[in-house]
Amino acid sequence: MANIKPLLKPLVFIAMLTPLLWLFWQWGLLFMGKTGALGANPIEASNRFLGDSALKLLLLTLMITPIRDITRWPAITRLRRMVGLFAFFYASVHLVSYFGMDLLFSIPALLKDIAKRTYITLGMTAFLLLIPLALTSTNAMIRRMGPKKWAQLHKLIYAIAFLAVLHYFFMTRGNQPGPWLHLGVLLILLGWRIAKWLPARRLLSMDTGPKMGK
Amino acid sequence: MIRVSKPWELSENQCTPEKLYLDRRQIIGSLGLSCGLVASGAIAKPPAPDLPLVAKTSKWSISDPATPEKLATSYNNFYEFGTDKSDPAKYAHALITRPWAITVEGEADKTGTFSVDDLIRPDELEERIYRLRCVEAWSMVIPWIGVPLRKILARFEPNSKARYVQFETRFEPEQMRGTRWPVLDWPYVEGLRMDEAMHDLTLMAVGMYGRHLPNQNGAPLRLIVPWKYGFKSIKSIVKIRFTANEPTNSWKKSAPREYGFYSNVNPKVDHPRWSQATERVIGGGSFSSLFNRRDTEMFNGYGEAVAQMYAGMNLKKNF
Ligand code: HEM
């Protein structure tokens, strides 16, 4: 156990990079004239794969605290920043893949889409909100902001996760199971926090109750 | 692109499906298994998808190179088998396509239940190479084999009240795993105005690429309405209903702001999710063609043949 610890971060780093490496490999196959796992419409498949990866990593980021609570293994929180930054990274590649391969880098087309298509508006909002979180994910920034303000800013992750799931809802046609599944996971992760927060608050109000009566 | 011989172009000496059926029964007979049960079991089996189909050529075919068959049979929107494009090819084999009954109801004199093999007459089969334009802004070119729908509908003798015709897809959760979740209000339904249904371009397809339809492409019989978005071309049909009033269609029911009854391909009317001005051409062959888009044509290029049916209609309102 003791000597796996220094390996943990590099291992997780490689694991998080694997989906992108796989995607590059598939494009390599396509370049050599072979149809790979991306199928008949590789651009669509890539955009979706990247969006799925970004959302899954976003939820994984939110999963770290419950996992810590359940396993009582505090060291795992040291992975949270990396997972969160990978979520941002995949969202960025998702955006670039859409902007580049679908819109062929046309800024007017992107602006038109953001204004016109609800799911793009939602996705873009989620992405823009992720930027300040990514920028402040350094030790220096935490020191500069102070842990309290920093933690407050990073509560944005909940709104971002909701926007991302909403983006998924609005993107799919019909009433598909995928968005519901991700919403379910998000609600459980939020519920975990509320369940932790509620008893703590009740204890607090019991403490202050009598004082306020005076 | 060089066009080599197409796999679905058959030489004269190849057997008709009927002959193959007979051969199969003869083989079974010669093996001494000639009890009636076995023989009728053999007939009730779905035709193997690799059985060749013989069809006449058609003046309606376009000359664009066909999408590779492998792509047309592995990239499908058939939500009854799952919402991922690769799901139908993975799961549609569970659908049993023989025996297959089609119920005909409503405003017609000859209603009732018919077997698919009675409705499709082999001598009426035509090959039609059509462009298929999906509402998701991609297109394929597919050599369908089928019978003009008008020839089939005429046999039911629709009466003077029949102004529309509605179609219904099979709904069988046991065999169609996608229907266990209410993606749409199952069963899937679609409709056409009578003049659209009777237009010579409208095809009841039973095959593609020279063979019987694979299940993921709508076996054993499906509609092809080439000037409308793909979702109008309803698959695996079990019901045909003649109606006096405009029938509902599943996508319109699901999202009336996004999908209408007509759903004619129209580059000028955007869908809230996709611009319809251009389309990605699936399966161009080269690496760079993966990025190819072509300008979407009004009525998917079939305007000359169909535009007069919509003369005087506001196509932005009737999308
Ligand atoms: C936090 C940011 C984002 C997350 C987590 C996210 C996630 C997702 C997810 C889960 C999907 C559905 C994938 C599927 O159906 O399998 C999706 C699809 C999509 N997203 Fe995002 N997204 C984000 C930001 C964006 C942005 C900024 C854009 C573009 C400006 C965008 C454009 C798209 C498009 C175009 C699709 C649909 C692709 C298609 O139709 O094939 N997304 N995204």
Image (cartoon, helix red, strand yellow):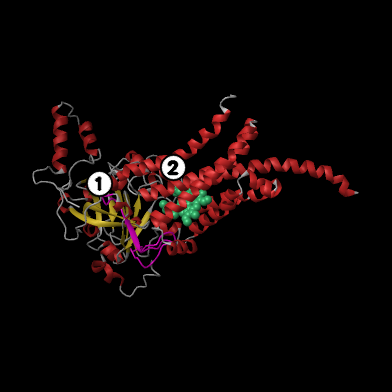
Q: Quadrant of residue A84?
A: top right
Q: Which residues are magenta?
A: B258-286
In the displayed structure image, the side of residue A98 where residue B240 appears, left or right: left
* Chain letter of the residue carrying label 2: A
Check disc 1 and report the residue beneath it: B69
Amino acid type at image mark 1: Glu
Residue visible at 58% across and 29% down in the picture: A5
Secondary structure under the numbered disc 1 in the rendered image: helix
Image coordinates of residue A25 in percent, x first then y, are 37, 40
Q: Main secondary structure of the magenta part?
A: loop
A169 versus A56 height, above or below? below
Work out which residue is located at the far left of the displayed protein and give it. B13
Locate residue B309 relative to residue A117 in the image: left or right. Answer: left
Q: Is residue B128 left or right of residue A153?
A: left
How packed is label 1: few (under 14 Cα within 10 Å), some, or many (20 or more)? some
Circle 2: element type: helix
Q: Residue at x 40, y 70 (%)?
A: B317
Say above or below: B192 vs B91: below
Q: Amino acid at mark 2?
A: Leu
Which residue lies under the disc numbered 2?
Answer: A20
